[in-house]
Amino acid sequence: MIIEFSVSYSQEEYLSIITDYALDISRKRAKENNPDKKITTNFWFTKKLLRCIGSIAFFYKVRKMPVCKFTLSSDKVIRKTDMGTDDIKWSQISSIAEYSDGMIISIEDNGMPIPYRCIGVEEKQWIIDTQRANSQ
């Protein structure tokens, strides 16, 4: 299967995806650093702060790369923007995180947001299955 689509992110979907991702990463790192400690962070405040910072990042992002063109094949993920091309083999992808408005394809400490409006249910499952098959 080959999945191709272009995305011009809306601010709301971009902030939703990256805020959920950042909170997820924060929780995981806090748990790794203190496995026995209960996490009591005020996530409401953190989410609001992340949305403020994310809004600035969003405006920078859409100025530099207003459209991302994705091609996902059984071998790799390609993202083309005005800033260049990322050509990533599935084995380089560390994980896929699913959220309410989209998923993040994670490469080390970087991620590529994929809004669900750009892919169907079968394509979403294929992406997840392909990453799992190549991470073993």
Image (tube, rainbow, N blue to C red):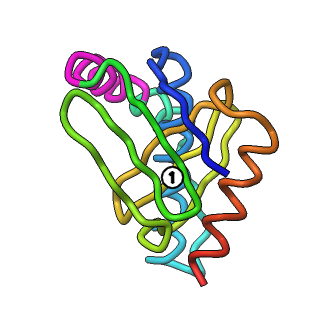
Q: Residue visible at 49% across and 15% down?
A: 10
Confirm whether the magenta stretch covers residue 39. no
Residue placed furthest toward the bottom: 136
Residue 80 sits above or below residue 130 on the image: above
Three-letter amino acid code at disc 1? Answer: Ile
- Please identify the quarter of the rendering in which residue 123 is found: top right
Residue interval drawn in magenta:
51-64
* Nearest to the observer: residue 127 or residue 98: 127
- The 10 Å Cα crowd at callout 1, few under 14, some 14 to 19, many 20 or more, is many
* Nearest to the observer: residue 132 or residue 10: 132
* Nearest to the observer: residue 119 or residue 20: 119
Q: Secondary structure at mark 1?
A: strand
Residue 118 sits above or below residue 94 on the image: above
User: What residue is pinned by disc 1?
Assistant: 105
Q: Residue visible at 50% across and 34% down?
A: 47
Q: Position of residue 99 (x, y in %)?
A: 66, 42
Q: Position of residue 19 (x, y in %)?
A: 49, 36
Residue 17 sits above or below residue 32 on the image: above
